[in-house]
Image (tube, rainbow, N blue to C red):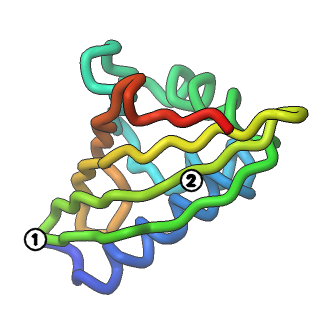
Amino acid sequence: MAPAPEAVRKTIEAYITAVTTGTVDEIVGLFAPGATVEDPVGSGVRDTEESIREFYSVVAGMKQTGEIYTARIAGASAAFHFRITTEAGDQTVEITPIDVMTFDDDAKITSMRAYWGPEDMVTK
């Protein structure tokens, strides 16, 4: 049985909040055991909690904001377009990926694939 759309939307919102202002534990806590992360698509799949934790440890603690532009939920899957803005010293970087996620019955993330490339990053 697929999770309720409201539960999936809540997980997506929690994901953006955790990635922008949370801790690695908060981010990883949104994932189901055995989840996978491919960010960006084509860069290789992270398929252990340790490798997912290592990946998100890079962004945890950075000064960031995020905004979801749109989300589409279909059963146990969702695609959403969003913006992440990162401040690093006197430089600001914006990235606008589209993430595609699948979810278990408890709306935990079972897979995440991020679609973006260098052309989706803007430095200000």
Q: Residues within 10 Å of mark 1 (few under 14, many from 20)?
A: few
Question: Does 32 appear above or below 116?
Answer: below
Residue that badge 2 annotates:
29
Q: Secondary structure at mark 1?
A: loop
Q: CA distance from mark 1 to mark 2?
A: 21 Å
- Callout 1 touching callout 2 (CB < 8 Å): no
Q: Which of the pair 19/46 is nearer the observer? A: 19
Query: Residue visible at 30% across and 48% down?
Result: 98
The N terminus is located in which quarter? bottom left
Residue that badge 1 annotates:
75
Q: As drawn, is 90 to the left or to the right of 36?
A: right
Q: Secondary structure at mark 2?
A: loop
Query: Residue visible at 41% across and 23% down?
Result: 118
Q: Which of the pair 112/108 is nearer the observer? A: 112
Residue 90: percent from left, percent from top? 88, 35
Looking at marks 1 and 2 on the same chain, the residue that comes earlier in the sequence is marked by 2
Q: Residue furthest front?
A: 124
Can you tell which of label 1 and label 2 is closer to the viewer?
Answer: 1
Q: As drawn, is 58 to the left or to the right of 108?
A: right
Q: Residue furthest right?
A: 89
Q: As drawn, is 48 to the left or to the right of 77?
A: right
Q: As drawn, is 111 to the left or to the right of 54?
A: left
The amino acid on which the numbered mark 2 sits, given as a three-letter code, is Gly
Question: Does 33 appear above or below 119?
Answer: below
